[in-house]
């Protein structure tokens, strides 16, 4: 299963992670805002290069959108990223191996269901044909370099189009097809996916266990109007020669951080054009054998209804790493409206959809469920970035430094690995290299 061919499908603090007091009146070479994949790799690289660095994080843990919770179910539950996309260019697979973690290729255990009829066979026939037809139409539109919406690229529909739209749009790009830019979709690199049995968040937190971070330290203002950077945080002021800002597009668009000088019009167009999508996991735990599928089975099912601007329903990563845990995935407009109705409604919806697929008897084996709500997380405000139709080209402006000293980095500034952990990691390294050049 790959990003193109299908959907993407313990509080991780270390001994060196601080409480926030370290931020008071600090004077350093570089301040890094956010301790997710981008901020952690930038901090690590700059410390290794000999700079004095402070990394400040608004939340009470590191990892940002990569976080494994082992307490809710007693088995790893990735609240954010779970797939290690594109193994050939994703450094986290080898990092995981070096750390002694169980990393493995995502098996090709795909099933297609129709409610009331069960599984319709391993290859899913008509669904796969339609999926391929839809992606071919988007590819062809992108090659003409007209940045239209993915919905407009598909001119004829059949009974499986809505399901294919869910898998290309809401369950992969975290947005409905009329909000997917064909150029942005086409620019994302493709390859084999891998998993980490202990959870992607566990891998990331182990990898950067020795990176010092000042937690519970929220940045409110970054001023580079003179020859230095002054950062105001909830716990004090930091003076630095340069800053790397790794917060999400959602946080940037919200205005929670005040920039001085203000962003220029190009950067503003990129903040408006590259927006956050909606994607969440509804995690359902069943007793062993209740959902009788191979580990890490991806389950698609026929979606006929449309609601709230997008397909009503989701897809399921069942029996995650053989634990019996299932991630019922929802995204786009429908997923966003479900998220806003609360975790209990999300769990009820997922359980009733799964009952319709596997039979009402599965309720007897249901243990418990919960759901993520990334759109309501004030430190993220959405799932990951994507370009609105016509806006893919604005992504490059996110890499232009503000006042030559403030560098944005994160999944959204990546070209080709946008919306991924690997992309965020490499963007952290890119920004660290740019800062090194500035300070050399
Ligand atoms: C549900 C979901 C599923 C996903 N699935 C996958 C997947 O399977 N594979 C994959 O590769 N990617 C996936 N992604 C995307 C991936 O998680 C992100 O692309 C990546 O983690 C982003 O890293 P980042 O460092 O750019 O940003 P973040 O992880 O958001 O880090 C930014 C940090 O900044 C902090 N912050 C925010 N505001 C402030 C402030 N004012 N002051 C200080 N700190 C602040 C935040 O708390 C956060 O820790 C998924 C995301 C979600 C939400």
Image (cartoon, grey):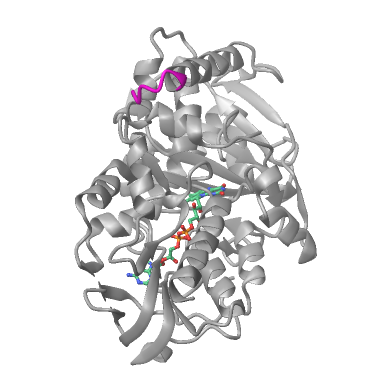
Expressed as whole percent of the image width and height from the top left, the position of residue 261 reads 20, 67
Asked if 432 appears above or below 289 in the picture, the reply is: below
Task: Name the quadrant of the N terminus.
Answer: top right
Which residue reaches farthest front?
A: 440
Membership of 147 in magenta stretch: yes
Number of residue marks: 0
**Quadrant assignment, res 305:** top left
Residue toward you, 148 or 381: 148
Instruction: Please name the residue shown 59% across and 11% down the image.
Output: 126
Expressed as whole percent of the image width and height from the top left, the position of residue 129 reads 59, 12
Q: Which span is picked out in magenta? A: 143-148
Expressed as whole percent of the image width and height from the top left, the position of residue 80 reads 51, 54
Instruction: Residue 19: tell me if it is visible.
Output: yes
* 313 left or right of 219 in image: right
Expressed as whole percent of the image width and height from the top left, the position of residue 234 reads 29, 82
**Quadrant assignment, res 130:** top right
Instruction: Residue 314: tell me if it is visible.
Output: no
Instruction: Please name the residue shown 42% across and 18% down the image.
Output: 144
Instruction: Please name the residue shown 39% across and 16% down the image.
Output: 153
């Amino acid at each position: 299963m790959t990003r193109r061919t299908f959907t993407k499908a313990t509080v991780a603090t270390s001994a060196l992670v601080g409480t926030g007091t370290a931020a008071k009146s600090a004077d350093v070479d570089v301040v890094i805002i956010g301790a997710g994949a981008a901020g952690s790799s930038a901090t690590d690289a700059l410390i290794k290069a000999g700079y004095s660095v402070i990394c400040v994080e608004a939340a009470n843990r590191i990892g940002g959108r990569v976080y494994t919770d082992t307490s809710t179910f007693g088995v790893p539950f990735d609240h954010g990223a779970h797939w290690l996309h594109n193994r050939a260019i994703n450094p986290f697979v080898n990092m995981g191996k070096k750390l002694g973690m169980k990393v493995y290729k995502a098996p090709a255990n795909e099933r297609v269901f129709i409610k009331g009829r069960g599984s319709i066979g391993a290859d899913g026939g008509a669904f796969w044909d339609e999926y391929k037809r839809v992606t071919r139409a988007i590819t062809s539109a992108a090659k003409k370099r007209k940045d239209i919406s993915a919905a407009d690229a598909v001119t004829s529909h059949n009974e499986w189009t809505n399901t294919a739209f869910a898998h290309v749009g809401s369950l992969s790009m975290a947005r409905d097809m009329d909000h997917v830019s064909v150029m942005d979709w086409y620019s994302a690199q493709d390859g084999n996916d891998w998993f980490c049995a202990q959870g992607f968040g566990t891998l990331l937190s182990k990898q950067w266990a020795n990176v010092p971070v000042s937690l519970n330290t929220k940045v409110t203002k970054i001023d580079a109007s003179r020859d230095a950077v002054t950062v105001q945080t909830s716990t004090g002021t930091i003076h630095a020669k340069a800053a790397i800002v790794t917060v999400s597009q959602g946080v940037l668009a919200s205005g929670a951080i005040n920039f001085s000088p203000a962003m220029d019009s190009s950067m503003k167009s990129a903040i408006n054009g590259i927006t956050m999508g909606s994607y969440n996991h509804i995690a359902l735990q069943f007793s062993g054998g209740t959902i009788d599928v191979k580990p890490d089975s991806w389950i698609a099912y026929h979606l006929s209804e449309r609601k709230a601007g997008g397909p009503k329903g989701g897809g399921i990563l069942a029996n995650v790493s053989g634990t019996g845990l299932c991630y019922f995935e929802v995204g786009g407009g429908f997923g966003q409206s479900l998220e806003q109705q609360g975790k209990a409604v999300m769990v009820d919806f997922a359980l009733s959809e799964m009952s319709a697929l596997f039979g009402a008897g599965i309720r007897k084996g249901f243990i418990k469920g919960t759901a993520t709500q990334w759109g309501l997380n004030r430190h993220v405000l959405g799932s990951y970035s994507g370009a609105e139709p016509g806006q893919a080209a604005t992504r490059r402006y996110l890499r232009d430094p503000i006042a030559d000293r403030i560098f944005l980095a994160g999944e959204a500034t990546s070209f080709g690995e946008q919306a991924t952990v690997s992309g965020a990691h490499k963007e952290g390294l890119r920004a660290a290299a740019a800062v090194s050049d500035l300070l050399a």
